[in-house]
Amino acid sequence: MFGIGTLEILIVLAVVLLLFGNRLPGTMRSLGRSLIEFKRGLQGADETKPAATVNSQTAASKDDKVAQS
């Protein structure tokens, strides 16, 4: 397509690995941690909405009990 063969791609990847090889593990580690944190944030957003409505319903029922007393 671009006139780049498999051998040229392997050479470029080898040069990139030599240049950035020492930083690559730290970069991948931080990328993994940020992905995990993002997933936790998505799950936390789903869990927070029902909890907020449960808390407001619980507070409303407590107010009703106090008003009835």
Image: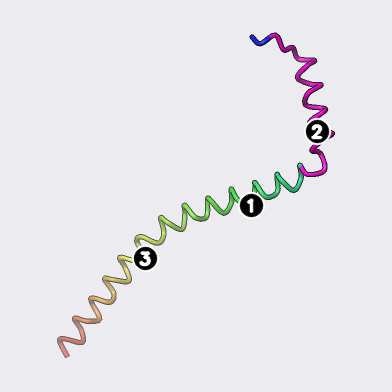
Residue occupying the point 75% across, 19% down? 9
Range covered by the magenta-colored residues: 3-23
Image quarter (top left, top right, bottom left or bottom right) of the C terminus? bottom left
Q: Is residue 5 left or right of residue 59?
A: right
Determine which of the numbered discs, if any, sits on residue 51 in the image. Answer: 3
Q: Report the mark closest to the observer, 3 or 2.
A: 2
Residue drawn 78% across the image and 31% down it? 16
Q: Residues within 10 Å of mark 1 (few under 14, many from 20)?
A: few
Residue 11 on image: x %, y %: 81, 21
Residue sticking out furthest to the right: 18
Above or below, 53 relative to 59? above
Q: CA distance from mark 3 to mark 2?
A: 47 Å
| Mark 2 to mark 1 CA distance (whole Å) | 22 Å
Q: Position of residue 61 (x, y in %)?
A: 23, 77
Where residue 33 is drawn, which disc sits there?
A: 1
Give the vertical position of 4 relative to 34 (above or below).
Answer: above
Crowd rating for badge 2 (residues with CA inside 10 Å; few <14, some 14–19, many 20+)? few
Amino acid at circle 1: Arg
Could you tell me how far apart the alpha carbons at marks 1 and 3 are, in whole angstroms? 26 Å
Q: Quadrant of residue 4?
A: top right
In primary-sequence order, the first of circles 2 and 1 is 2
Which circle, 2 or 1, is nearer the viewer? 2
Q: Position of residue 43 (x, y in %)?
A: 47, 54
Residue that badge 2 annotates: 17
Mark 1 vs mark 3, foreground winner is 1
